[in-house]
Image (cartoon, grey):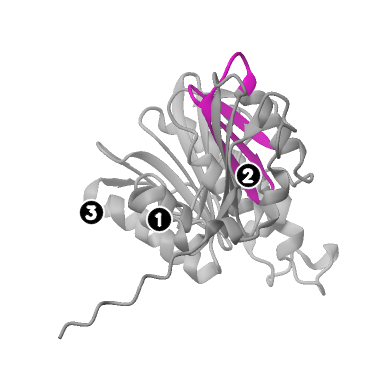
Amino acid sequence: MRIAPPPRNEVNFATIDSPSLQFLPRQQEAQIWRLDEDPIVIPGDHLNTYLGSVEAPRFARYETLDLTIGKYSTPAGAGFATVEIYRFPDFVKAFGAYSQQKSGKFRFLDIPNESFAKAHSVHVWRGPFYVRITGAGAGDAVLRLARFVSDRMPPAPSKPAVFAFLPDKQRVTGSERYSADSAFGQSFLGNSFQATFNVDNDVIEGIVIPAANKQTAENVLDQYKGLYLHNGKLLDPIPNLGEDNFTAEDRFLGRVVAFRIDRFIVAFNGYHERQHLLDLATAADQRILGTIRKQLVTADQNADDRNTSTVPAWMRRR
């Protein structure tokens, strides 16, 4: 005799708690918007039940803790909106998940820390939270809902400090991104902080990878160099650029200037003028030297002995 399988353990997402719930407006707190039903909270390990098998893994890579969802409509029935609040362990991962949505046509908003709008959605990054609101309403109704939610959130840090290693000049405003997955189409260049540059209409992508340690950084740079060694052409290295560097070009991969300082890898990739890449790399090299020189000198070294042989040559450069 066949035995019927036990009933599945269904999760009641309406009974799960999250700090994000406090940011959702109730009843008609957000003026014309009315909460249609009780919000739900989906734990990070159940995201596929709501996002599906394609989008859920993308958020999982940024270690999403939970997703809080509220559905709204306007009393007249002319507007509808779904508010999704993704919560992360830190503001860097939240920024990463948010920044990966910056594609296609969009316009930046003035909602801090950073935000933008697409045709039918508003996206807000605020500290360890990423808010995505989809829907439609009269005038700027969806935007006003986004402002209401974000205003309830606590103040948060600005962009990750690693972006300070990339030049400010000629950087495209708002182009900063963080990718846990890849850069330049290569998975070994994941965990990278990325930005776009426009040098006389020459569009260039730049990345910084803070590796776990110096050895890991060396391995990543070698792997990147090997990619061009097998597919393209290596050019002469640049004197006094980082502790190690390479330049190369390939018809499909484009031109690159990449270097390493301690555990940081920096690379610029484009398809036109090599000199533009070199200029950006040189500027990044100087910014890193100025930013982390003191951090990398051990506590018992002072200004008088920095020029001794115990200090790496790249740290003695001016």
Q: Name the outermost residue toward the top.
A: 139
Identify the residue under disc 2. 163
**Where residue 277 appears, x then y in whole percent?**
47, 35
Nearest-to-viewer mark from 1 and 2:
1
Alpha-carbon distance for marks 3 and 1? 39 Å
Q: Is residue 180 above or below residue 8?
A: above
Residue 114's label in the rendered image is: none
Task: Indicate the secondary structure of the residue bearing disc 3.
Answer: helix
Q: What quarter of the picture does the N terminus occupy?
A: bottom left
Side of 124 relative to 291 (left or right)? left
Q: Is residue 8 above or below residue 88?
A: below
Mark 2 burial class by Cα count in 10 Å: few <14, some 14-19, many 20+? some
Identify the residue under disc 3. 230
Q: Which residue sits at x=25%, y=77%?
A: 4
Q: Which residues are magenta?
A: 113-141
Q: Does the stretch in magenta take in 116?
A: yes
**In which image quadrant can residue 8 be found?**
bottom left
Task: Indicate the secondary structure of the residue bearing disc 1.
Answer: helix
Q: Earlier in the sequence, mark 2 or mark 3?
A: 2
Identify the residue under disc 1. 48
Can you see residue 283?
Answer: yes
**Where residue 255 appears, x then y in whole percent?**
36, 38
Q: Which residue sits at x=66%, y=48%?
A: 160
**Where residue 62 appears, x then y in whole percent?**
51, 56
